[in-house]
Image (cartoon, rainbow, N blue to C red):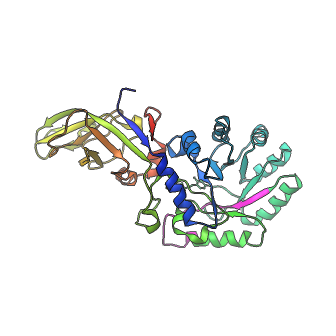
Amino acid sequence: MYRKTEAHINLDAIRSNFALACSLAPQSKSLAVIKANAYGHGMLRVAEALQDVAPAFAVATIDEALELRKAGINNALLVLQGVTTAAACNTAASNNLTLVVHTPEQVEGLIEAGVSVPVWLKIDTGMHRLGLAPGDFADARKRLAAGGIDVQVACTHFACADELDGDATRQQLESFNAATSDLDLPRSIANSAGVLAWPESHAQWNRPGYMLYGSSPFAVDVVTARELRPAMTLRSEIIAIRAVPTGESVGYGARWTAERPSIIGTVAIGYADGYPRHAQNGTPTLVNGKLAPLAGTVSMDAITVDLTGHDNARVGDSVELWGSGIAVNAVAAAAGTIGYQLLTGVSSRVPRTYF
Ligand SMILES: *Cc1c(COP(=O)(O)O)cnc(C)c1O
């Protein structure tokens, strides 16, 4: 690669964030959620970095799980969306996968496929996206058992755990406890926000994802999240510099206009790389460690930043878009989205480099 746009991935930071998730919940086992290419960080590299410390990994799809198996990852693998066809049930069984079962159709499909796979049975406690109604859980478990299928864990997922006030999370916990506290069954509730801020949600298995990559799922300061270390630094370089007189505009739609004689730097990264097109004027970038606000609409392959006052900026200088100097959450906020979307959206055009 000759273009100097890349995502530096610090695997050590991911290991340290995983250790933090474990230490916050010493009574729980933590699986590492590495779906969506490990939130953009490279699923295989992250799996290799965690395979000796994570008792299990979670992915969204069976295809992600198969990619891990093909690469020789032998840890337990949980498929969060489960499967929908008999062929996939068989493939799951022969690859030693664990399936989340969240609909009555999946219950019946597994029984009909006649294969024996370990199952996490999911309850919808209020998010209303995936999961059986709490009242249907016991019967589904019985039917699966009769079909030779072992329910290993009862699980649910939070809708609002990143909001620290409000009743939604407490209500979900109550609903889950009511449905499962009498069962002699391990349970799993907590995502990153649960791990960091809801100790009452720590169960036999926790499922941290986003926090492993070093950012906080919260918009507010949460003490337990302060030790997280951002794992990805997205970098590029300045490829052009020009003086722009007062009153002249920059970029598509002329959405930024110089209010003073300005120096504009063009940086080799755009929305085709995953830099968010909706990032507003003023979104922070770092040039030689100094703040350079976005100036003008994000293009496909380039952005423009205001270098006025950067006396030494030159073509070829390194630019940080997010990472240890600029929180991905800050860029996301300036683009009307969340850090999860930015990390998972770094495109395949951007090489990942590891250290
Ligand atoms: C993605 C996902 C997680 C991880 O959530 P984070 O907010 O990234 O920690 C946990 N559980 C389920 C079911 C998920 O889909």
- Which residue is pictured at 87% across the width and 52% down the height? 148
Examine the image and state in which quarter residue 146 appears: bottom right
**Is residue 233 found left or right of 153 in the rendered image?**
left
Percent from the top left, x then y, of residue 271? 38, 37
Question: Considering the image in quadrants, where does the N terminus appear?
Answer: top left
Q: Is residue 128 magenta?
A: no
Please indicate whether residue 102 sits to the left or right of residue 327 in the image: right
Position of the C terminus by quadrant: top left
Q: Position of residue 321 (x, y in %)?
A: 34, 44
Does 177 sit left or right of 342 as displayed?
Answer: right
| Residue toward you, 153 or 318 | 318
Q: Which is nearer the eye, 126 or 44?
A: 44
Identify the residue at horizontal 73%, vertical 53% (top origin): 103
**Which residue is at a point 79% across and 48% down the rendered structure image?**
117
> As displayed, is residue 103 above or below residue 254?
below
Residue reaching furthest to the top: 2
Q: Is residue 181 left or right of residue 42?
A: right
Viewer-side residue, 212 vs 178 = 212
Give the magenta range: 151-169
Magenta residues: mostly which secondary structure? loop
From the top left corner, tell me how far across and down residue 140 is, in percent: 80, 59
Relative image position of residue 125 (x, y in whole percent): 65, 65
Q: In this view of the protein, can residue 47 be seen by the observer? A: yes
72 in relation to 177, above or below = above
Asked if the magenta segment contains residue 162, the reply would be: yes
The answer to whether one can see residue 194 in this image is no
Identity of the residue drawn at 39% across and 36% down: 6
